[in-house]
């Protein structure tokens, strides 16, 4: 039952994200600068006015290329090659290996030494790109403190965006790659006290990597769905300040 549950969640997320990235509307709320993470950064000429926080340096994109084309392949590649999702995906979708001592449909097991699974080893490179996307998400979130009169303000959207960006930070910083970057290949921790501090912090997060992986999946969907609803006018943003 657990692999089935995980498979259902992963397939739901893939279906939701696919529909949303090709929708090309309802991804930005100009009054409060809310931009969904699925479209950030929006750098094409046909992005709605105000949503291009990093300028427009791509021409207008045809309907079959998502407006979030810069970050989406990075985020998707980072998640697909993540060790946690690999475990879930291999057990619930790929069926190889399914679990210890469980007979599987594949006759031969080659692990990640052959095409296509050899690409899983690119995870360490995806981390650097995903970290850059995370910084972009933080920038977007900071812009989300825009009040109705254009000054400072906080709404339910701001809170949801910040919960999401913190969950994404937890997911990215708890990655095994980050743990290796901060403390890997050191012979003496005593000679690198700062890296040891980072490594200790990341190691604590790392123990909860699976939780961050799943939580951030849902916070991304929640953030996108909320921004879609406000942008489409289904309901208005609940304001706490201004
Ligand atoms: Fe999951 Fe790196 S191991 S994001």
Image: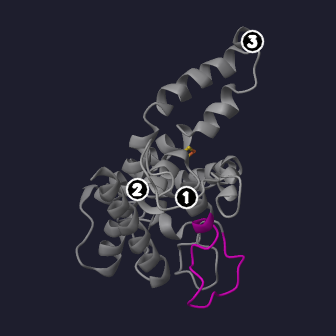
Nearest the camera: 222 or 34?
Answer: 222
> Residue beneath label 1, please?
80
Judged left or right of residue 166, residue 202 is right
Label 3 vs 2, first from the N-terminus:
3
Q: Residues within 10 Å of mark 3 (few under 14, many from 20)?
A: few
Residue 166 horizontal/vertical position (percent): 44, 44
Disc 3 and disc 2: Cα gap in Å?
A: 37 Å
User: Mark on residue 18?
Assistant: none
Write the start and end of the magenta stretch as one range.
55-73
Queried whether the magenta region covers residue 32, the answer comes back as no
> Are discs 2 and 1 less than 8 Å apart at CB?
no
Check disc 2 and report the residue beneath it.
217
Q: Which residue is disc 3 drawn over?
A: 188
Side of 38 relative to 70 (left or right)? left
Q: Horizontal and vertical percent for residue 73?
A: 61, 67
Residue sitting at 64 percent across and 83 percent down? 45
Question: Gap between marks 2 and 1, in whole Å?
Answer: 12 Å
Q: What is the C-alpha distance between the residues marked 3 and 1?
A: 33 Å
Q: Residues within 10 Å of mark 1 (few under 14, many from 20)?
A: some
In magenta segment, residue 59: yes
- In the image, residue 222 sits, relative to residue 186, either above or below, namely below
Is ligand 1 closer than 8 angstroms to the Cβ of mark 3? no
């Amino acid at each position: 039952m657990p692999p089935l549950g995980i498979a259902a969640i992963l397939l739901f997320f893939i279906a939701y994200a696919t529909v949303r990235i090709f929708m090309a509307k309802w991804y930005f709320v100009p009054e409060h600068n809310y931009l969904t993470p699925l479209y950030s950064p929006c750098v094409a000429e046909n992005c709605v006015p105000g949503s291009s926080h990093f300028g427009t340096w791509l021409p207008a994109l045809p309907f079959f290329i998502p407006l979030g084309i810069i970050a989406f392949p990075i985020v998707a590649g980072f998640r697909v090659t993540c060790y946690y999702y690999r475990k879930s995906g291999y057990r619930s979708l790929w069926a190889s290996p399914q679990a210890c001592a469980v007979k599987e449909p594949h006759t031969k097991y080659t692990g990640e030494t052959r095409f296509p699974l050899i690409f899983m080893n690119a995870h360490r490179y995806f981390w650097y790109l995903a970290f850059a996307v995370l910084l972009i998400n933080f920038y977007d979130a900071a812009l989300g403190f825009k009040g109705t009169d254009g000054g400072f303000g906080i709404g339910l959207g701001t809170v949801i965006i910040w919960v999401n960006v913190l969950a994404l930070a937890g997911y990215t910083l708890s990655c095994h790659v980050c743990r290796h970057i901060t403390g890997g290949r050191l012979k003496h921790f005593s000679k690198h006290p700062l890296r040891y501090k980072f490594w200790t912090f990341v190691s604590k997060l790392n123990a909860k990597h699976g939780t961050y992986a799943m939580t951030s999946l849902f916070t991304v969907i929640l953030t996108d769905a909320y921004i879609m609803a406000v942008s489409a006018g289904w309901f208005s943003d609940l304001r706490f300040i201004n």
